[in-house]
């Protein structure tokens, strides 16, 4: 199994969710996060002053899928999160050796 974690723009979530459903992936965890990457934040103007905002709001998506779906899920997220501008996000793929369903105690490896 693989845990695919993606940090993306919030406005892209509905498109990513539909794309994952087309791949047969319905379960996911979403978390609001703050961070910055290569873009280094943004400068905002407010009441005549310039303010630098170093941390930008993003959403982190965690999806655990069979290894056979890894490429399709990464491709779906990449395609639907893309704007071509700095701040589109990042995807991490992590091996998951085992998971246990709390309700039933069922172990998947």
Image (cartoon, grey):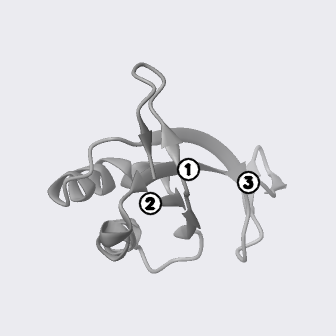
Residue receiving disc 2 = 1
Say whether disc 2 or disc 3 marks the residue closer to the N-terminus: 2
To which residue does mark 3 refer? 45
Estimate the x, y position of residue 22 in percent, counting from the top left: 15, 57
Is disc 2 placed on a helix, strand or loop? loop
- Say whether residue 39 is left or right of residue 72: right
- Cα gap from disc 1 to disc 2, whole angstroms: 19 Å
- Does residue 78 appear left or right of residue 76 in this picture? right
Residue 11 makes an appearance in the image:
yes
- Mark 1 vs mark 3: give the one in front: 1
The image quadrant of residue 39 is: bottom right
Q: Is residue 58 above or below residue 107?
A: below
Distance Cα–Cα, label 1 vs label 3: 28 Å
Write down the residue under mark 1: 60
Q: Kindly indicate whether the residue at mark 2 contacts the one at mark 1 (C-beta within 8 angstroms).
A: no
- Crowding at mark 1 (Cα within 10 Å: few <14, some 14-19, many 20+): many
């Amino acid at each position: 199994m693989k845990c695919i974690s993606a940090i993306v723009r919030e406005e892209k979530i509905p498109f990513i969710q539909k794309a994952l459903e087309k791949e047969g992936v319905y379960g996911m965890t979403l978390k609001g996060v703050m961070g910055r990457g290569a873009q280094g934040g943004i400068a905002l103007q407010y009441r005549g002053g310039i303010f630098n905002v170093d941390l930008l709001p993003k959403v982190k998506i965690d999806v655990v899928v069979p290894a056979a779906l890894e490429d399709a899920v990464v491709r779906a997220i990449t395609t639907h999160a893309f704007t071509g501008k700095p701040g589109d996000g990042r995807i991490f793929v992590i091996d998951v050796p085992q998971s246990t369903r709390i309700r039933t105690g069922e172990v998947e490896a």
